[in-house]
Image: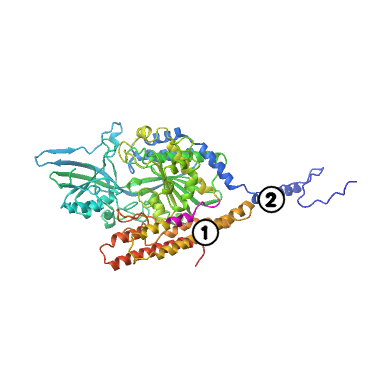
C-alpha cells in the first residue's frame, strides 16, 4: 500500500493539470527569483577562481606586434609638451580609448613651460684662435627641423665670457678637492660630467652656491655620437605659477617675477679636460622663453561594479623631448595595449570590482607637471578613494627587470611576476630571472622625484609602484631616441614590452578585483626596521631612536591584527556569510594607512609640498639616506650648528617620523585612541 501523500510545504513546486491563473504564475516566478537571489548570495563564486580566470585571459591577449604598431604611430614626429605636434599624440590616445568603447575624457591645464630661442658656445684660446661648437645634433631625418634644440628647461637667459673649471661630477666632495688644489671656481663657467646620481638641478644648485656663473653639463662615452641630452633644471614639481594648486583656466597664478617662481628656476647647459680655470675662456649665450601653454591629460575609465568609488590608477606620461620611443612612449604603448586587453575582457563579460583609471600625463619632462596638477586638483577625492597608483615611464630601456614600490605592495609585485613569462629566458618567469639576478630582495623605494609617482606618493600618500626593463640607455633625452633604435637595440621582438604590459595590467587586476586588498603591512614594518638600523649607525649616542622603535612596534601590532582579521574574513567569505561591510571597512584601513605617513607641515626648510616623511627627496643631493627625508635634512643641515642644537634638530625630526608611523598604525587599526 502506498503511503499517503504529504501536504506540500511552502517551498514545494508542482504543476497542476490545468493552466495556473495569472496571479499564481506571477507569484511562482517571484518566488523562484527570490530563491535564485538567495542562493547567489549564499553560494558566491570563489573570487580567487574568477580572478585567476580573468588573469589567464588577460595574459593570453598579449600581442607584441600590436604594441610595436602603437609605438611606431606615437613616435612618427617629435612631440614636446605644449607644442602643436604634441596634439597628434593627444588625439591618437583619445581615439584609441574611444575606439575600444571606453569612457574617455581629457583634462587641460594652463601651465608655465620653458623653450629655447637661441644659444651659442665658443672657446677662445690665448693664441687668438676660436672654436665654435655646433649646438645641434646631426640627425638624418626629415623631421630634424622639428626637433627642439638641446637645452635645459627653466634655465635663465644670459651671456657669460669667462674661464672654465672642470669640477668632475659637481658634488660637494669634488669642490672640496678643488679647494685643496687651490682652485676657486667663483666667477667661472663650470664643466660637469653627468653621473653619480646627482640630478641636473642638484648640479646647478651646488655650482650656484660656489659662485659659478654658468654650468656646462655633458655625458661621457657610451652615448650615441652627436647626441645631446635635454632635461629640466627646475627646482620643484608641477607648474611654477600654481605651486600647491591646479593651473586651471581662470584660476590663481603667481607672476613671472614672483620670488617663489624664481626659486624654482636654475641655470645650465651641455657639452664643451683639465681642471682649470683657463687658460682658455668660453663665450656662452643662452636665450630662452617661458610661456603659459595648455597641456592635456587623457583618461580612460572602467567603472567598478561593486565599489565604483575606489580607484586603481595606471599612469604613464606621453610627452617627450624628441621622438620619445623609449622615454616615455614604450610605456604609452604598453598602456594602450592594456586598454585593448581590458576591452576584450569586458566583451567577455568582465567588469572590475573597483574602478580602473588609465591616465596619460602631459609635460612630465618639465617636472611631472600634468600629473601634479591633476593630483592637486583632486587631492581630497584621491586621498579618500585612491587604492594605489601604478606607474610606468620608460617601459623598456634594455635588459633586466627593475621595480620600486611602497613596501606593502612588495609581495603583490612578487606574486604577479611569477605569472608572467620572462622575455629573456625561455621557459622561465619574470620572477625566476629576477631572483637569479638577486634583485627580488632589492625592490627600490620611491624617494626620488623622477617620474609621475611623485605627486601620488609624496604629496597625496597613495601606495605606489614603478616598474621598467633596463636600468639605462645611451640615447636618453636625445634626438636618437627613436622607434628605429628601440627596434634595433632595446627590444627587437617587443617581448620586453609584452612583459611590462603583463605585469602592469595584472597588478591592476589584483588591486581592482580582489575582495580584500592585497596589502601586507608586515613588509612595511620590516622595511622600517631596516631603515632605523641604517639610521642608527649615523647618529650620535645622545640622539634617541626610541620614538621610532616604539612606533614601529605599534605598527607591527596593528599589522598582525589585520593579518588575523584577513584570515577570519576569508573563512567567512568561503562560507558565504554576509561580510560586505566588514570587507569595506578593512579595505579602507588598508588603503588609508599610507596617508598616515604624511605630515601637514611637509619637509622643513623648503617646499612644504613634499609631505611624506618616510619616502621623499632629501634637500642634500648627496645624502646617505634615501628614506626619512626630514631626518636626512636635519643630519646634513645641522653641521654648522652647535652639538646641542644639532642633536635637538635631529631628535625633533625623529619624533615627527615616529608620530607619522603612529598615525599609520592608528589608521590600520581603525580605532580612536
- 284 part of magenta stretch: no
Check disc 2 and report the residue beneath it: 34
Extreme left residue here? 127
Judge from the rendering whether residue 251 lies leftward or rightward of residue 302; answer left or right: left
Check disc 1 and report the residue beneath it: 560
Residue at point 39%, 59% (across, down): 532
Span highlighted in magenta in the image: 515-527
Crowd tier of the residue under label 1, counting other residues whose Cα lies within 10 Å: few below 14, some 14–19, many 20 or above: some
Crowd tier of the residue under label 2, counting other residues whose Cα lies within 10 Å: few below 14, some 14–19, many 20 or above: few
Q: Position of residue 401 (x, y in %)?
A: 41, 42
In front here: 451 or 352? 451
In front here: 4 or 644? 644
Residue at point 44%, 44% (across, down): 435
- 516 part of magenta stretch: yes
Q: Position of residue 427 (x, y in %)?
A: 49, 36
Q: Position of residue 523 (x, y in %)?
A: 47, 54
Let me know if residue 612 appears in the view.
Answer: no
**Looking at the rendering, which quadrant does residue 657 occupy?**
bottom left
In front here: 365 or 303? 365
Dot 2 or dot 1, earlier in sequence: 2
Note whether 544 is above or below 204 in the view shown.
below
- Element type where label 1 sits in the image: helix
In front here: 238 or 498? 498
- Alpha-carbon distance for marks 2 and 1? 40 Å
Judge from the rendering whether residue 3 lies leftward or rightward of residue 391; answer left or right: right
Let me know if residue 225 appears in the view.
Answer: yes
Residue at point 22%, 39% (across, down): 135
Amino acid at each position: 500500500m502506498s503511503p499517503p501523500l504529504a501536504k506540500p510545504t511552502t517551498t514545494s513546486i508542482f504543476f497542476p493539470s490545468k493552466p495556473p491563473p495569472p496571479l499564481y504564475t506571477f507569484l511562482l516566478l517571484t518566488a523562484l527569483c527570490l530563491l535564485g537571489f538567495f542562493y547567489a548570495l549564499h553560494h558566491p563564486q570563489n573570487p580567487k577562481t574568477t580572478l585567476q580566470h580573468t588573469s589567464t585571459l588577460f595574459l593570453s591577449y598579449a600581442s607584441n606586434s600590436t604594441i610595436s604598431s602603437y609605438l611606431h604611430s606615437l613616435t612618427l614626429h617629435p612631440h614636446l609638451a605644449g607644442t602643436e605636434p604634441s596634439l597628434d599624440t593627444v588625439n591618437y590616445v583619445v581615439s584609441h580609448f574611444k575606439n575600444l568603447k571606453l569612457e574617455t575624457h581629457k583634462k587641460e591645464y594652463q601651465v608655465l613651460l620653458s623653450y629655447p630661442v637661441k644659444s651659442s658656445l665658443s672657446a677662445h684660446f690665448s693664441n687668438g684662435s676660436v672654436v665654435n661648437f655646433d649646438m645641434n645634433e646631426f640627425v638624418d631625418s626629415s623631421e630634424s627641423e622639428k626637433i627642439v634644440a638641446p637645452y635645459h628647461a627653466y634655465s635663465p637667459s644670459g651671456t657669460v665670457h669667462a674661464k672654465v673649471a672642470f669640477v668632475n661630477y659637481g658634488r660637494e666632495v669634488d669642490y672640496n678637492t678643488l679647494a685643496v688644489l687651490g682652485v676657486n671656481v667663483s666667477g667661472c663657467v663650470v664643466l660637469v660630467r653627468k653621473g653619480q646620481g646627482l640630478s641636473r638641478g642638484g648640479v646647478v644648485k651646488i655650482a650656484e652656491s660656489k659662485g659659478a656663473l654658468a654650468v656646462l653639463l655633458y655625458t661621457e662615452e657610451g652615448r650615441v655620437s652627436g647626441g645631446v641630452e635635454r632635461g629640466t633644471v627646475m627646482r620643484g614639481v608641477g607648474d611654477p605659477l600654481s605651486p600647491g594648486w591646479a593651473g586651471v583656466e581662470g584660476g590663481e597664478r603667481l607672476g613671472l617675477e614672483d620670488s617663489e617662481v624664481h626659486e624654482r628656476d636654475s641655470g645650465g647647459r651641455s657639452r664643451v679636460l683639465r681642471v682649470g680655470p683657463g687658460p682658455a675662456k668660453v663665450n656662452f649665450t643662452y636665450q630662452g622663453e617661458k610661456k603659459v601653454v595648455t597641456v592635456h591629460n587623457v583618461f580612460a575609465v572602467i567603472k567598478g561594479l561593486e565599489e565604483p568609488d575606489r580607484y586603481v590608477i595606471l599612469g604613464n606620461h606621453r610627452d617627450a623631448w624628441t621622438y620619445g620611443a623609449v622615454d616615455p612612449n614604450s610605456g604609452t604603448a604598453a598602456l594602450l595595449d592594456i586598454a585593448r586587453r581590458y576591452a576584450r575582457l569586458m566583451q567577455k563579460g568582465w567588469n572590475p570590482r573597483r574602478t580602473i583609471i588609465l591616465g596619460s600625463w602631459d609635460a612630465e619632462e618639465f617636472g611631472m607637471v600634468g600629473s601634479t596638477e591633476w593630483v592637486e586638483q583632486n587631492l581630497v577625492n584621491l586621498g579618500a578613494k585612491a587604492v594605489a597608483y601604478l606607474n610606468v615611464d620608460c617601459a623598456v630601456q634594455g635588459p633586466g627587470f627593475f621595480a620600486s614600490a611602497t613596501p606593502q605592495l612588495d609581495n603583490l609585485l612578487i606574486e604577479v611576476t611569477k605569472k608572467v613569462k620572462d622575455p629573456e629566458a625561455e621557459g622561465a618567469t619574470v620572477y625566476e630571472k629576477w631572483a637569479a639576478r638577486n634583485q627580488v630582495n632589492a625592490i627600490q623605494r620611491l624617494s626620488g622625484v623622477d617620474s609621475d609617482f611623485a605627486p601620488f606618493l609624496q604629496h597625496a600618500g597613495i601606495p605606489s609602484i614603478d616598474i621598467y626593463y633596463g636600468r639605462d640607455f645611451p640615447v636618453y633625452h636625445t634626438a636618437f631616441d627613436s622607434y628605429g633604435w628601440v627596434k634595433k637595440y632595446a627590444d627587437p621582438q617587443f617581448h620586453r614590452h609584452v612583459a611590462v604590459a603583463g605585469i602592469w595590467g595584472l597588478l591592476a587586476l589584483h588591486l581592482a578585483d580582489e575582495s580584500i586588498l592585497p596589502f601586507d603591512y608586515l613588509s612595511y614594518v620590516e622595511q622600517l626596521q631596516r631603515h632605523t638600523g641604517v639610521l642608527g649607525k649615523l647618529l650620535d649616542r645622545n640622539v634617541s631612536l626610541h620614538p621610532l622603535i616604539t612606533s614601529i612596534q605599534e605598527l607591527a601590532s596593528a599589522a598582525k591584527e589585520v593579518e588575523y582579521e584577513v584570515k577570519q574574513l576569508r573563512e567567512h567569505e568561503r562560507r558565504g556569510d554576509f561580510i560586505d561591510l566588514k570587507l569595506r571597512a578593512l579595505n579602507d584601513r588598508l588603503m588609508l594607512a599610507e596617508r598616515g605617513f604624511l605630515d601637514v607641515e611637509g619637509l622643513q626648510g623648503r617646499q612644504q609640498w613634499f609631505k611624506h616623511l618616510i619616502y621623499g627627496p632629501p634637500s642634500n643631493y648627496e645624502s646617505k639616506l634615501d628614506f626619512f627625508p626630514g631626518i636626512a635634512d636635519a643630519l646634513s643641515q645641522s653641521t654648522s650648528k652647535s652639538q646641542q642644537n644639532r642633536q635637538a634638530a635631529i631628535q625633533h625630526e625623529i619624533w615627527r617620523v615616529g608620530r607619522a608611523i603612529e598615525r599609520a598604525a592608528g589608521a590600520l587599526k581603525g580605532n580612536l585612541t
